[in-house]
Amino acid sequence: MKGLVIIMKKVAIIMGSDSDLPIVTPAIKQLKELGIETEVRVISAHRTPEEAHEFSSKAIENGFGVIIAAAGMAAHLGGVLAASTTLPVIGIPCSSKVLDGMDAMLATVMMPPGIPVATVGVNAAKNAALLAAQILAVGDDKLMETLINMRKEMAQQVRDKDAALQEKLKEI
């Protein structure tokens, strides 16, 4: 159709605390590299629950396609956001001084039936960004092609490293 403009959905990155910024920075950078508009906010599941509900309940109408929620300790942020939207929510459990992120991991993955939160590894913000991009790419052929090419480049990097290793092993 001539004149049809497809606008890519945005990704929201919501942190429970500004102290999570170093953890989510790789996600912000990855999404920017992919040309995906990103909005980053601090919203607490426990200290500002009204704002969490307001943000997630209006996320679809505000042009978001995926929400990434980064939280540590009592990591309920992903679940609180997911409770008010049907958008995909991806949780990033953040490590803390206590239990090294295992508590956040368990809090993020243990959602009740009907309110899913996809979860990446502890502090795995880049994977959260890539998962968000893969979700958006289902309806965006150009983004899908970019992701396929990234995978090909990663595979070639591994092959190049193996070849370099094989050369070093000849010297041993």
Image (cartoon, rainbow, N blue to C red):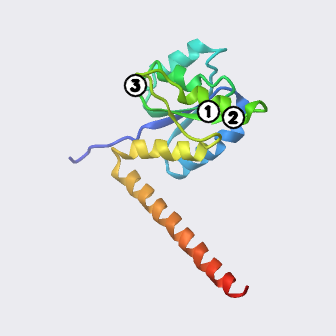
Q: Residue at the far right: name it.
A: 97
Q: Residue 111: x, y in percent?
A: 50, 24
Looking at the rendered structure, the kind of residue marked 1 is: Met
Looking at the rendered structure, the kind of residue marked 2 is: Gly
Q: Is residue 74 above or below residue 4?
A: above
Number of residue marks: 3
Alpha carbon separation for disc pair 3 and 1: 22 Å
Marked residue nearer the N-terminal end (3 or 2): 3
Indicate left or right for 171 with 45 as reference.
right
What is the secondary structure assignment of the residue under circle 3? loop
Q: Is residue 30 above or below residue 66?
A: below
Q: Residue at x 46, y 65 (%)?
A: 152
Q: Residue at x 41, y 26 (%)?
A: 60
**Quadrant location of residue 168?**
bottom right
Q: Which residue is mark 3?
A: 86
Residue 101 badge: 2
Q: Residue at x 39, y 47 (%)?
A: 137
Alpha carbon separation for disc pair 2 and 1: 6 Å
Q: Residue at the far left: name it.
A: 1
Q: Nearer the viewer, mark 3 or mark 1?
A: 1
What is the secondary structure assignment of the residue under circle 1? helix
Q: Which residue is mark 1?
A: 105
